[in-house]
Image (cartoon, coloured by chain):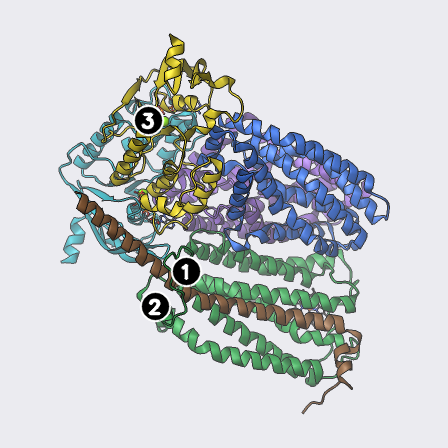
Chain colours: A green, B brown, C purple, D cyan, E blue, F yellow
């Protein structure tokens, strides 16, 4: 059924494809992000309740959405890696995890910076905030585990397993935190105000969301390329590539050469 | 075509009094994103160089092993 | 089944080798509980308020401290690679490990729970809730700890990495279990929380041993 | 023709290659082993002997190639397959739990590896451990611990033994004993794969050597 | 001195082997802290009230989780017996072990203390008290943990026994340190508590390394 | 007369006895070792060889008897005595920290055991570890790890080497290399005490064997 996917699972092919896509994705991502940011920062009216602080939405919401999106794509890759034993998928887990972690961190930081003017405090133990924090921990766990082994392949496999376990647990965490918060705290904090967004505000937001997605894709391509090289370094095609870069004179030829 | 919302550039920087929060978030966001890209790009650039170095080390080791073998053979 | 019994007996012997060993988790638990009044101040109503959380955090700790060693020794001595090579006994071995670690770390807590209730000034209803929630929650805790131990087996990074992996997974358990005890203190019904705990336990009991198996195979290979 | 080869041999492997730390340890190694045969894998330190044994035992996956047990690839095998039950693997690590006594260790192995229900005292006595049966193994000397671990070979019913340097820490008399046991196992139609850096004194009728070359 | 440096560099390398490793204690600390609001409830004033106790208990845990492995690996690999045989380097080795374990488990807490203060809703004065008490208290904690680790080296009982040995010794530290933070939150003077902490630290620094040395020799012999 | 004996020998021990688990391992064992001498302690598994070595190295106390270093009893020695500095002890356990590289391990030993400040790369290359200097030792094969541990012998300035089964896991070429190193050390006036179950190929001019009998 998935036979047509086979050539893409070949590391060498995937390396080439990622190399082809990366410049386009990156350029597009930078353009949309720039456009969305400039538009959202300078060319939309202020919110009647929140004033200009609401402009944080243009990075907060995309980062929050794609922090979860990145986790799902990572978990899908991990699942593929475990079930079908496809090595490229294994490496993709390690490539996506840091991007997801940075997105999550951005969602947290921008949320905190938004919360201070809106709620008067940097941090409250709200359900959504808490579950985002736990998402960050999950990401960091995957990263820490993948780096904890002397044997790189083993680290990749173990962190793939952890990512899958985490995805089973993620909804449980989400609902438990939601439930916990409503039990302990009444509606002391105003829930996320959902202003019926004016189209003039919506467009830059959508642009930013698209931009974050493109950036996620672009960075994944870049990091996956590195991972492929690292893990396939004993193959002839990588050796040939390395020798080419050697001949370009990038590498100083030393005889002592005891540092690698 | 939307118009520039603020009256002046200084008003733009002040962000209606929310300058700290808005610029803090935008700054940290782009800082983090840029850092991530820079780090990824750097490791991508380095890896081929490292591989080339590794290969030359391999050759050195091979050469030394050959030398040793030759020395052993001439002894016996 | 034979294998399960043999592996269980083996664990049991290891525990019994040092006669005072089964007392240790209990003492640890009591000492950690006494740390809280000392560190926080002994106002009774404050203590009763934080009691459910504290009990569950102490339980977590006593499981965590034991977890790192769960498979380590067998990995180091080569027993584990022989079991993986033999394949069939592995599942029973994992089950026996988890069961015996539950018996040695969590079961004693049940016996000591009246004392805990007394120390923290909880009433009988709260005590009952503690017992029930420990009964349903601690097996889950041991399952998660076993998973963490299996994942980090050949990483050799010690307890901190293990804790990092387990703690986020542990949060739902903490929330529901301490909510159950909380409700009981307030005289409310807590069967809903217990039901959720039971459901989580069933899910984990079905999935986690398989994940542990997979992780062990990974680490040996 | 390949099919014919496969059916006569117990264990066979084709075109095995192993990569460790981005170094190709060996490449295109073929192994065939028939009943009654002893295969001695030799090579310098770091040549990849242990890595090969782990692949043959199904503990690690080869980067390329395939291991066949009675003509069936290991990678496709069902859980709890015939292979795992016909295998007795003892690696560099002995698998002796140091806090348990020799008897207790044996008892566990009897259940785990489906060993014969023979008298463990008798087996331990054969191995020169009479009187030391109920002492925690950590209090035994290095060679005695190794003997406890090898006691399994007197009880196992597995056809294929894979042993990584079984003679380490053993004294000459124990080595002789072990080699006699090897001989008996081979005569009964078993097969053995082992590595060792010591010379094998005993002559085995059907013994072959596979030399792995240390490559950088 | 050469030996101290060499041993310290060695520990440092072990820690630095994976680049992300130094982050682990920090993350562990933050995760443990989040357990408390989740288990106890997120009322800000309640949190602020129990904050000093929580911080000190989390510090204890991160030291405890690392302590068991302090000498274990070197004992298992035979490094320790070679050091005991060589005699002279042993003292520097012990000092380097304790120092580096402090650097890796306790020092990060100082860096993260502002974040902690933020999460638990503490003010600047309380934060200052936290930093000062951590600075004086955590070395003591590490000294005690090293002693426990050395004593239980060949017992092979794992973290629980170690915890039992350390916890009672740890109680005075907990009382004074959390009292200092408590006082600071109330705007009172807490120099007396700090002085007691400093005195305890000096005493321990003079005596504990010798005791560790003795314990190591015993366990190897 | 006893005094005379003592002054000529580097290490001597009188009437040593060792009791382990209420079993007398050996009793009234005398050891004398002069500069340039190699003492091979032989015996079956469990005879007490390792226990004797640990006593001679000052790691354990004999139940009876006394060990003298240059005529001075070890039990009375001052801390940081001459003896500890003249000793290089490598037991069953190799003392290699598996997470550190060979280089880093050597560097630590150079400071800890006051080794020569020679080029560690050269030493590792002699031992056939060229190119593996900066790989964590846990990724080396059993024999390679052993080689790392023995690299110390190429750098140490200690007079007395006490080695417990140094040839374990080593291949034939490494054993040869090690024996050459032994010879050189002996020629320079050093002394060696070792145990091994393998035959020593090299002929040492001043080599003696002390046989410990396995007693129940
Ligand atoms: C540290 C603090 C915060 C965190 C971790 C956080 C996290 C999140 C998350 C995870 C989402 C979910 C996106 C989705 O479900 O698709 C979200 C959406 C959103 N957040 Fe935040 N947030 C924080 C603070 C704030 C603050 C202070 C505000 C405004 C007052 C805010 C306004 C919003 C809005 C308007 C959305 C989109 C709502 C929706 O589409 O459902 N957030 N945030
Ligand atoms: N766990 C590991 N991770 C990565 N590489 C390893 C690992 N174990 C061994 N290697 C590498 O594989 C090579 C072969 O190791 P292996 O253990 O198979 O050798 P061996 O032939 O058994 O040697 P010995 O005779 O010393 O036992 C070693 O040179 C080492 O660099
Ligand atoms: N740690 C210990 N505690 C108690 N008894 C021990 C301990 N180690 C060894 N023994 C006992 O002392 C005896 C001798 O042990 P030792 O290790 O000295 O033997 P060995 O001659 O070195 O044997 P091998 O050739 O196997 O290394 C053993 O039979 C054992 O019963
Ligand atoms: Mg080997
Ligand atoms: Mg011995």
Mark 2 belongs to which subunit? A
- On the image, numbered disc 3 is attached to which residue? F195
Quarter of the figure with the N terminus of chain E: top right
Residue A83: assigned label: 1
Crowdedness near tag 3: few (<14), some (14–19) or many (≥20) residues, C-alpha within 10 Å = many
Is ligand 5 within 8 Å of the beta carbon of the residue shown at mark 3? yes
C-alpha distance separating marks 2 and 1: 35 Å
Discs 2, 1 touching: Cβ within 8 Å: no
| Number of marks in picture | 3
Q: Secondary structure at mark 3?
A: strand
Q: Position of residue D136 (x, y in %)?
A: 43, 26
Mark 3 belongs to which subunit? F
Which of the two residues, E108 or A25, is positioned nearer the viewer here? Answer: E108
Q: Secondary structure at mark 1?
A: helix
Q: Secondary structure at mark 2?
A: helix
Q: Position of residue E207 (x, y in %)?
A: 65, 29
- On the image, numbered disc 2 is attached to which residue? A243
């Amino acid at each position: 059924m998935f036979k047509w996917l086979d050539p893409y699972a070949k590391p060498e092919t995937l390396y080439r494809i990622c190399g082809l896509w990366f410049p386009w994705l990156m350029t597009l991502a930078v353009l949309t992000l720039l456009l969305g940011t400039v538009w959202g920062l300078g060319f939309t009216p202020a919110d009647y309740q929140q004033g200009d602080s609401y402009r944080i939405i243009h990075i907060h919401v995309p980062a929050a959405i794609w922090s979860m999106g990145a986790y799902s794509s990572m978990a899908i890759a991990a699942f593929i890696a475990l079930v079908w034993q496809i090595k490229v998928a294994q490496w993709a887990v390690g490539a996506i995890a840091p991007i997801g972690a940075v997105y999550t961190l951005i969602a947290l930081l921008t949320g905190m910076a938004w919360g201070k003017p809106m709620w008067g405090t940097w941090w409250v133990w709200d359900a959504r905030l808490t579950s985002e924090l736990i998402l960050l921990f999950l990401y960091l766990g995957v990263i820490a585990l993948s780096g904890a082994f002397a044997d790189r392949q083993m680290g990749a496999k173990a962190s793939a397993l952890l990512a899958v376990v985490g995805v089973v647990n993620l909804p449980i965490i989400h609902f438990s935190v939601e439930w916990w918060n409503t039990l302990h705290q009444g509606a002391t904090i105003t829930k996320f105000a959902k202003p019926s967004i004016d189209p003039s505000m919506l467009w830059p937001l959508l642009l930013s969301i698209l931009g974050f997605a493109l950036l996620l894709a672009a960075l994944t391509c870049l990091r996956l390329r590195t991972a492929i090289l690292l893990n396939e370094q004993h193959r002839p095609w990588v050796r040939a590539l390395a020798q080419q870069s050697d001949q370009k004179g990038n590498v100083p030829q030393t005889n002592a050469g005891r540092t690698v | 075509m939307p118009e520039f919302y603020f009256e002046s550039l200084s008003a733009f920087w002040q962000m209606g009094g929310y300058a700290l929060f808005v610029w803090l978030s935008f700054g940290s966001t782009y800082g983090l994103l840029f850092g991530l890209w820079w780090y990824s790009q750097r490791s991508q650039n380095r890896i081929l160089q490292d591989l080339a170095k590794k290969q030359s080390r391999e050759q050195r080791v091979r050469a030394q092993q050959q030398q040793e073998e030759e020395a052993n053979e001439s002894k016996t | 089944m034979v294998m399960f019994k043999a592996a269980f007996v083996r664990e049991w012997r290891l525990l019994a080798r040092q006669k005072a060993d089964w007392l240790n988790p209990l003492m640890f638990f009591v000492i950690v509980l006494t740390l809280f009044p000392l560190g926080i101040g002994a106002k009774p109503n404050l203590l009763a308020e934080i009691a459910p959380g504290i009990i569950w955090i102490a339980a977590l700790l006593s499981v965590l401290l034991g977890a790192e060693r769960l498979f380590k020794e067998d990995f180091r001595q080569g027993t584990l690679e022989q079991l993986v090579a033999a394949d069939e006994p592995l599942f029973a071995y994992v089950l026996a490990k988890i069961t015996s670690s539950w018996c040695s770390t969590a079961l004693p807590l049940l016996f000591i729970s009246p004392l805990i209730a007394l120390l923290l000034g909880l009433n009988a209803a709260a005590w009952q809730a503690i017992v029930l929630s420990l009964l349903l929650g601690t097996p889950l805790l041991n399952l998660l700890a076993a998973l963490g131990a299996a994942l980090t087996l050949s990483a050799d990074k010690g307890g901190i990495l293990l804790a990092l992996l387990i703690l986020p997974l542990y949060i739902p358990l903490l929330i529901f279990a301490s909510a159950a005890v909380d409700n009981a203190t307030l005289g409310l019904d807590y069967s809903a929380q217990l039901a959720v705990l039971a459901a989580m336990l069933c899910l984990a009991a079905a999935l986690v041993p398989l994940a542990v198996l997979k992780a062990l195979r990974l680490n040996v290979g | 023709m390949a099919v014919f080869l496969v059916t006569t041999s117990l264990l066979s492997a084709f075109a095995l290659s192993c990569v460790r730390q981005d170094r190709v340890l060996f490449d295109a190694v073929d192994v065939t082993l028939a009943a009654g045969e002893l295969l001695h894998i030799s090579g310098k330190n770091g040549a990849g002997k242990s890595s090969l044994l782990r692949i043959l035992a199904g503990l690690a996956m080869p980067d390329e190639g395939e291991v066949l047990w009675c003509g069936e690839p290991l990678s496709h095998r069902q859980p709890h397959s015939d292979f795992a039950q016909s295998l007795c693997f003892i690696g560099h690590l002995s698998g002796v739990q140091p806090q348990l006594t020799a008897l207790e260790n044996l008892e566990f192995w009897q259940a785990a590896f489906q060993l014969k229900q023979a008298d463990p005292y008798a087996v331990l006595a054969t191995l020169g451990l009479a009187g030391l049966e109920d002492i925690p193994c950590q209090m035994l000397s290095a060679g005695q611990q190794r003997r406890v671990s090898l006691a399994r070979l007197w009880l196992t019913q597995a056809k294929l033994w894979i042993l990584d340097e079984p003679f380490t820490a053993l004294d000459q008399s124990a080595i002789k004993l072990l080699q006699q046991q090897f001989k008996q196992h081979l005569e009964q139609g078993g097969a053995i794969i082992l590595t060792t850096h010591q010379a094998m004194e005993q002559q085995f009728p059907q013994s072959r050597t596979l030399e792995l070359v240390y490559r950088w």
